Image: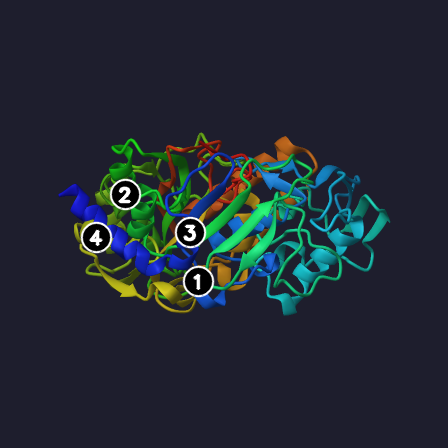
Amino acid sequence: MIDVSRRSLLKGALGTVALASLAGCGGAAGGSNGRLRVAFPTSGARESLDPHTSSLFVDQARTKALFDTLVGYADDMSVVPRLAESWEPDATGTRWLIRLRNARFHDNRPVTAEDVLYSYRRIADPATASPARQQFAAVDFAASRARSATEVELVLPAPNFEFPSAWGAPAAEIIPAGTTDFAAPVGSGPFRFVSFQPGRPAVFARFDGYWGGAPTPAELEFVPINEGSARVAALMSGQVHYVHDVSANSASLLQGDGRTTVLAAPHGTMQAVALKIDRPPFNDPRLQQAILSGVDRQGLLDVALSGHGQVGNDLFGKGLKYYPQDLAQRERDLDLARGLLRQAAADGLEFELMTSAADPYFESAATLIAQQLGEIGIRATPRIGPAETYFSDIKKSGVAAHTRTATLPLTTFMAQRMRGDAGANNYTGYRSPEFDALFTRAMSTADEAERARLLTDAQRLTRDNSGLLVWGFSDWNVAVSSAVSGIRAAPPNSLDWARFDHAVLV
């Protein structure tokens, strides 16, 4: 019975996997130092190898193989050196001197300060439409300069002692100065380009001149498989060595199979409901608080996440640097929730809760939240939207919607989602001059302990007023074949996430 199920899944996999590529690789995966095959969901014909326009996880994984950034993120999102060997601000926090290590691009050109300036100018250019643009839009490029081939000085109009976090952001890779064509891109990453077509597999080869040491696999192939069950089937059948984004249910299945290993990064993804507080009914703070008090977060963890994760406390970033670890857990309080509804004369409140299949946990969580809120007399009706456009749809419409965010530096999340000038990425419509002032003071503070205190104050403010109900953090699961070693569990966007140059095939 189990074998039949696997064959069925495999049939689904082969409907999506590029068959020609797999046949060309000689069937079952394996072979010491051979081709490592990794499976990711992709976006088909819209794909590109331009690192500055990447937004999907597969884009980021491919750019990590081909390119490099000045810094990377440790698991707690603190910065660690990459192409930047060292850096230091001046006393004002507006002028940063960065020293580059001795690294080369795949065509043997050295990575220079001019390459850094060109890359960041391109990212900041609105015409590039880079998701990292906000990180570099404030840089004064007229005042910034290359001090030498290996020293670059970046100038800001205002102090920012967290500026190095920007250099490790997704889509902030360094490219050779003057690059405009990414059909066969040249980077300084551990693998060099071999072949790629949008929606098809991408093949990269080991770059022996990589500054971090030559990778172990001779080749790396990205295999497009969109359906989660099909990715799992491809792994179990030996067609791929690594599968990305494994659901909790699939993780449980794989944990009982000796051919695979599940690598789970704890609290890798925030699971939340965004209440839009810039419009009725949640522009009434009493109704925001009624929802926050009426939800059973532990129940959501147990059911929607099947226990694979951690309870949320209405703040992003659990476990990350600057997260207030000592904050008391918000508990469900039905009496408080009912009292707030009465005060607001909103007994019998009704609203639509937007959800979709964009995340494997959204729909089950929406159903359970509707049941929980029903116990205090609120009628929350789940409304399922198309997965393809879900995250852009909920920016523009509705009053409440499920959302998620993978790991990011906490200050990046606060700047992009909570500040008054965050634009469409501020999903809840939160506007607070008090928060903006606290955050600006924190960024302007050289003393790290004082900066942490200010950021903690800012987070406490958003926890009660931003309209973000963070009910949990799901583990970030990937799975690897037992024939592979050298890959570890790591949060998405961290340095070791989707990092394949140290993988060993046996």
- What residue is disc 4 on? 8
Indicate the position of residue 134 as horizontal and vertical percent values. Answer: 61, 58
Q: Earlier in the sequence, mark 2 or mark 3?
A: 3
Q: Secondary structure at mark 1?
A: loop
Q: Name the one closer to the observer, 82 or 506.
A: 506
Single out the residue that lies furthest toward the left: 1
Answer above or below: position of 355 versus 272.
below
Closest to the camera, between mark 1 and mark 4, is 4
- What residue is disc 1 on? 43
If the image is split into quadrants, where does the C terminus sit?
Answer: top left
Crowding near pointer 1: few (<14 within 10 Å), some, many (20+)? some
Indicate the position of residue 231 as horizontal and vertical percent values. Answer: 34, 49
- Kind of residue at disc 3: Phe
Marks 4 and 3, how far apart at CA:
20 Å
Q: Name the one closer to the observer, 90 or 54.
A: 54
Q: Earlier in the sequence, mark 4 or mark 2?
A: 4
- What residue is disc 3 on? 40
